[in-house]
Image (cartoon, rainbow, N blue to C red):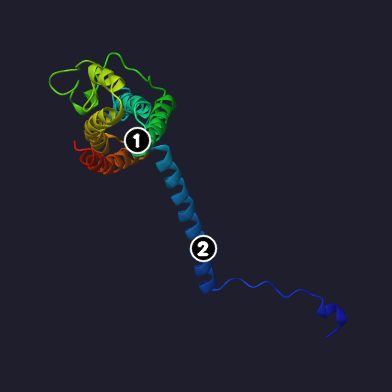
Amino acid sequence: MTGDEELLPAPARRPNRTQWAAITAVALALLFAGGAVTVASAEREEAPRTPTSLSADAGFARDMSVHHQQAVEMSFIVRDRTRDEEVRRLAYDIANTQANQRGMMLGWLDLWGLPKVESAVEPMTWMGMGGSGDTGPLDGALMPGMATNAQLDELRRASGREAEVLYLKLMTEHHRGGVHMAEGCVQRCSVDIERNLAQGMVDAQKSEMLLMADMLKKRGA
């Protein structure tokens, strides 16, 4: 064999049946993979649409924002009416938690392009209640568990142990109503992150209700 012959390339070989089968399998796998990506993309595009103004998602976000605002207000009132560190610590935790949650819910309404106040819709309509139970709003108590204006004025006038006991009683009822509303969202809301927040409210507020029951017992109430 000459030197020139050694440099000649080997003749190209055609794939045999086994190789053709392997090539076909790879091609089909790539084709189906591409189809799966396309389907996944389509599913993301078909995610639940933005909630409407009359949806449970929007109703809960609006109503619970108002409900939370009163809890924050009551907590700031009692903070200035007692020196008891246990009550002040609880009030701080409630105010901080509910203020943050309120900000999240109002932010969702902004994200959805919905008004924060829907004057044409009564509170609790999204739960089929249309007011505070069957009797309608009473002296500022627009939703379940909310304190009346008279009760808030009483809390502002109280001090020391009297303020602590009144706050704990009012907040226990406030939490009971809040749990009722949050459970309604867990059942009715369609946005996963909102349902998760609502379930977190249920769990946390039930725990705080047990704590407040112990605190009331210690104060002979």
The residue shown at (15%, 24%) is 133
The residue shown at (58%, 71%) is 15
* Residue 191 figure quarter: top left
Using the image, tell me which numbered label, if any, was put on residue 84: 1
Foreground mark, 2 or 1, reads: 1
Residue 160 image point, x, y percent: 30, 29
Residue 116 image point, x, y percent: 37, 20
Furthest toward the bottom, the residue is 1
Is the C-beta separation of discs 2 and 1 under 8 Å?
Answer: no
Using the image, determine if residue 42 lies above or below residue 143: below
Using the image, tell me which numbered label, if any, was put on residue 14: none
For the N terminus, give its image quadrant: bottom right
Residue 19 image point, x, y percent: 54, 71
* Residue 167 figure quarter: top left
The residue shown at (35%, 35%) is 84
Using the image, determine if residue 90 lies above or below residue 34: above
Residue 65 image point, x, y percent: 34, 26
Using the image, determine if residue 106 lies above or below residue 33: above
For the C terminus, give its image quadrant: top left
Task: Answer few, some or many: residues within 10 Å of disc 1's Cα (few below 14, many 20 plus, some between 14 and 19).
Answer: few
Q: Is residue 166 left or right of residue 104?
A: left
Q: Rounded to the nearest whole Å, what is the CA distance between mark 2 and mark 1?
A: 73 Å
Disc with the residue nearer the chain's start (2 vs 1)? 2
Using the image, tell me which numbered label, if any, was put on residue 26: 2
Q: Secondary structure at mark 2?
A: helix
99 or 118, which lies in front? 99
Q: Is residue 130 left or right of residue 89?
A: left
Task: Answer few, some or many: residues within 10 Å of disc 2's Cα (few below 14, many 20 plus, some between 14 and 19).
Answer: few
The residue shown at (19%, 22%) is 132
Q: Amino acid at mark 1?
A: Asp
